[in-house]
Amino acid sequence: MLIIKRHKTDPYFNLATEEYVLKEIPDDSFMLWRNAPSIIVGKHQNTLAEINVDYVKHNNIPVVRRLSGGGAVFHDLGNLNFTFIQTGKPDLLVDFRKYTQPILDVLLKLQIDARFEGRNDLTIGGKKFSGNAEHIWKDRVLHHGTLLFSSRMADLSHALNADPLKFRDKAVKSVRSRVTNISEHLKKPIDVMMFADLIQEHIITMYPDAASYDLGDDDHQKINELVRTKYSTWEWNFGYSPNYNFKKILRTEKSGTIEFDIDVKNGTILHIKIFGDYFSKFETEDIEEALTGIPHEESEIRKALERFNLSDYFANLSIGEFLEGVF
């Protein structure tokens, strides 16, 4: 068992590292890592339907899609992530209890009554502190989980507070649970890095062949290439989302009410229809035609709109206000 040391807090790099270790390092591996404030969405989710777009944009929060399924989660430096990557028999790879048991063992030593509940959660007093997910690749499993230790709960709530009325799709929706931080239940205070040390020490006792491994220059080069080509791209983080229909009503003091109805396929606007009680000099079909066939992404829509004098189509409406209506 390799104990792979992870020091970076860049979410793009950290998610790419998991895929790299899964596919390029044949040894069984264990990793502990943290991300700077970011939102990590499940592989099969509609990203825009999971996040509070305005809050994420205002706070410049990265949004990254992971390899595994499950729901969206908010990461910050008070959240510790753990990852097991192991080779096994195909019918025995998925085992949430096996990979979460070491965490429960450590918490028991800290006199915390933590439990495995439901499909993939760890709880204290009925409140969730860990969500877990798995991804199978050939004869290998990647199991990873979050450990809320001292996370800022207000940030978590705001970042994931999406408007459920905007979207109609078949994507897997996150189920919000009551959550708690591990630090709130400790008999004696420790910080998140001390907690990480306790987990690592426990893993080392579980695996007699445990050996420390530092990612080298060659590893970093290949991981950064994966970041460049996949994990930092709009195509993976947003465009990979399932097909969806987006609806929103924008109410402005000067322009009136404008309603947007957008069909998106593979991240691209397939069809858009704009309704409302706004006044216009020219027909808005010109705008609809210009937006059809481009990504449902802010910079691309802004670029398409800059060709027009928008006030000729929506009296007194700015590009910024229009963008508020389509996200």
Image (tube, rainbow, N blue to C red):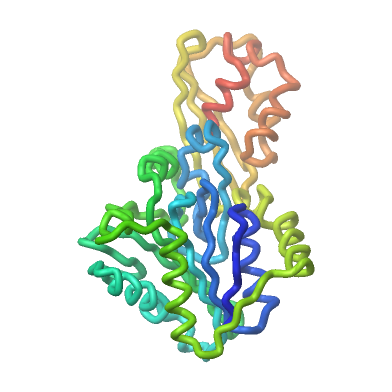
Task: Report the side of 157 relative to 171 (left or right).
Answer: left
Looking at the image, can residue 55 be seen?
Answer: yes
- Which residue is farthest front? 188
Q: Nearer the viewer, residue 284 or 308?
A: 308
Give the answer, above or below, for where 25 lies relative to 277: below
Looking at the image, can residue 136 be seen?
Answer: no
- Which residue is farthest left? 125
Q: Nearer the viewer, residue 261 or 63?
A: 63
Task: Report the side of 262 relative to 297 (left or right).
Answer: left
Q: Where is residue 95 shown, x and y percent of the image?
A: 41, 80
- The image quarter in which residue 181 lies: bottom left
Quadrant showing the N terminus: bottom right
Give the answer, above or below, for where 108 lies relative to 227: below
Q: Nearer the viewer, residue 191 or 313?
A: 191
Residue for point 59% across, 82% down: 211
Residue for point 56% across, 60% down: 66
Residue for point 35% across, 73% down: 106
Give the answer, above or below, for where 270 lies relative to 219: above
Q: Where is residue 196 shown, x and y percent of the image?
A: 46, 65
Q: Nearer the viewer, residue 297 or 208?
A: 208
Q: Where is residue 53 shown, x and y percent of the image?
A: 50, 37
Q: Where is residue 170 shown, x and y percent of the image?
A: 45, 55
Task: Give the number of marks.
Answer: 0
